[in-house]
Image (tube, rainbow, N blue to C red):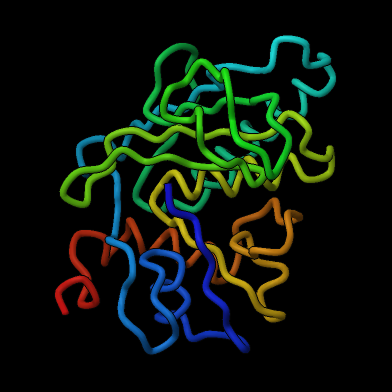
Amino acid sequence: MAQEFIQVPGPLPDDAFYRAVACAAEPGGTCRKPFLRWPDHRRGNLTVALSSVKADLPSYRRDLYERGLEEALVQINALDAGLRLRRIDGPADIEIHVVATPPGEVMRDTGVPDLDGALLPLGRVALRARGGEIREALIAVSSTTRRREIASVMLEEIVQGLGLMTDIRGPAYRRSLFSEDGNSVVRLRGQDAMALRRHYGERGASTPEEES
């Protein structure tokens, strides 16, 4: 689990923005994390499941998480970014758990060993990867997330589960999905969309920044 943020003074060129969210590179700096992607043979049919929900969560709040998940998949699939996500019931490549843990506390008794013992900011992603290839993604989202933030948090965590794991902090990016300081974006646009397309699109197999 590694979801730090990059502080930036102003707008970044596309290359610098992509490297910031994909490998935690400071502007003009080197990568601090490896590039992680789902392997080619799985990209056309990545499965996503709402695997567990806090037992006593009111039905109207569960509906918000359900709707947030569906809308996130629509946004990602509409990009034609070189991968396709499909919701299923049961074991999935990307599993989402709505847990009782309030933001800022350590997760306990989630029923998912890879999540228990980890601090939950609001949402959190754990990737299992080897050799730069993601094998599984586990997402935890707090059941106390504010109603108006749920859709944004679901979209951000799923995108992070695709390998773009680092946020950005700076006034120019308050309306970015990757903003460290806000959860209001529910559409993939501008540099946010560019980053995902680039991660899996024409430069997805091997990029100069990975070879240097």
Q: Nearer the viewer, residue 2 or 44?
A: 2
Image: 30 above or below 47: below
Which residue occupies 61% across, 41% down?
120
Residue 152 in the image: x percent, y percent? Answer: 69, 47
Image: 79 above or below 50: below
**Total numbered badges shown on the rendered structure:** 0
Residue 85 in the image: x percent, y percent? Answer: 44, 35
Residue 70 in the image: x percent, y percent? Answer: 62, 31
Which residue occupies 76% across, 55% down?
184
Residue 93's image quarter? top left
Q: Nearer the viewer, residue 163 or 25?
A: 25
Residue 55's image quarter? top right
Q: Nearer the viewer, residue 130 or 75?
A: 130
Judge from the rendering whether residue 201 lies leftward or rightward of residue 26; answer left or right: left
Judge from the rendering whether residue 194 lies leftward or rightward of residue 70; answer left or right: left
Image: 149 above or below 110: below
Q: Quadrant of the C terminus?
A: bottom left
Judge from the rendering whether residue 40 lies leftward or rightward of residue 160; answer left or right: left
Residue 39's image quarter? top left
Which residue occupies 83% across, 40% down?
146
Which residue occupies 81% across, 14% down?
59
